[in-house]
Amino acid sequence: MRLLHTMLRVGDLERSLSFYTEVLGMQLLRRKDYPSGRFTLAFVGYGDESDHTVLELTHNWDTSSYAIGSGYGHIAIGVDDIYGVCGQIQAKGGRITREPGPMKHGSTVIAFVEDPDGYKVELIQLSSRA
C-alpha cells in the first residue's frame, strides 16, 4: 500500500493551479472536467503519480469558497533551502504566514505559507544548511 493523493476543495481552480505550479513549483499532471457533475479535478505534484503522492484540487463549479474547519492542519513539503524558497515564494506573490526558523520546543527549521483558499502549507528544511 502507498498514499496516492490528498484532496483539497478550491474555490477558483485557475488561481489555485497558478499558486501550486508557479509559486510552489509543482507540475499539473492531469485535469478533467465532469460536466454532468459540474466539477473539475486537477492533480498537481513534484513527480509522476505512479511513484509520488500528489495533490488533487477539486473545483465544484457552483462553489466559490469553503470553510476550512478546525480539523484541517496542513500539507508539508520538504525543501533543501527554506530561506531561499521562502524568498522565491514571496517574490511570486505567495503569502508567508510564519517566517523560517526553528520550531517551538525543537530544532527543525520550518515556515508556513498560505494558499489562495487559506490552506496552510508547511515547509520543512531537509538538509543541514539551515
Image: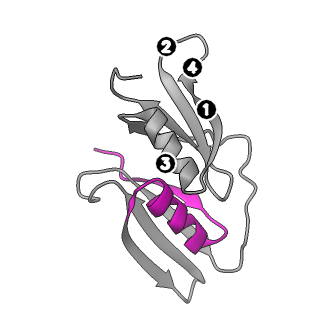
The span shown in magenta is 1-27
Residue corresponding to mark 2: 107
The circle on residue 88 is 3
**Cα separation between marks 4 and 3:** 21 Å
Viewer-side label of 4, 1: 1
Residue corresponding to mark 1: 99
Q: Is residue 5 above or below residue 39?
A: above
Q: What kind of element bears circle 4?
A: loop
Does residue 21 show up magenta in the picture? Answer: yes
N-terminal of the pair, mark 4 or mark 3, is: 3
Q: What kind of element bears circle 2?
A: loop
Q: In this view, does 26 lie above or below 100?
A: below
The x, y position of residue 46, in whole percent, is: 33, 54
Which amino acid, mark 3? Gln
Which amino acid, mark 1? Glu
Which residue appears at 74% of the width and 47% of the height? 69
**Cα separation between marks 4 and 2:** 6 Å
Whether label 4 touches label 2, CB < 8 Å: yes
N-terminal of the pair, mark 3 or mark 2, is: 3
Q: In this view, does 91 lie to the left or right of 66?
A: left
Viewer-side label of 3, 1: 3
Whether label 4 touches label 1, CB < 8 Å: no
Q: How crowded is mark 4: few (under 14 residues within 10 Å), some or many (20 or more)?
A: few
**Cα separation between marks 4 and 1:** 11 Å
Q: In which quarter of the image is the C terminus?
A: top left
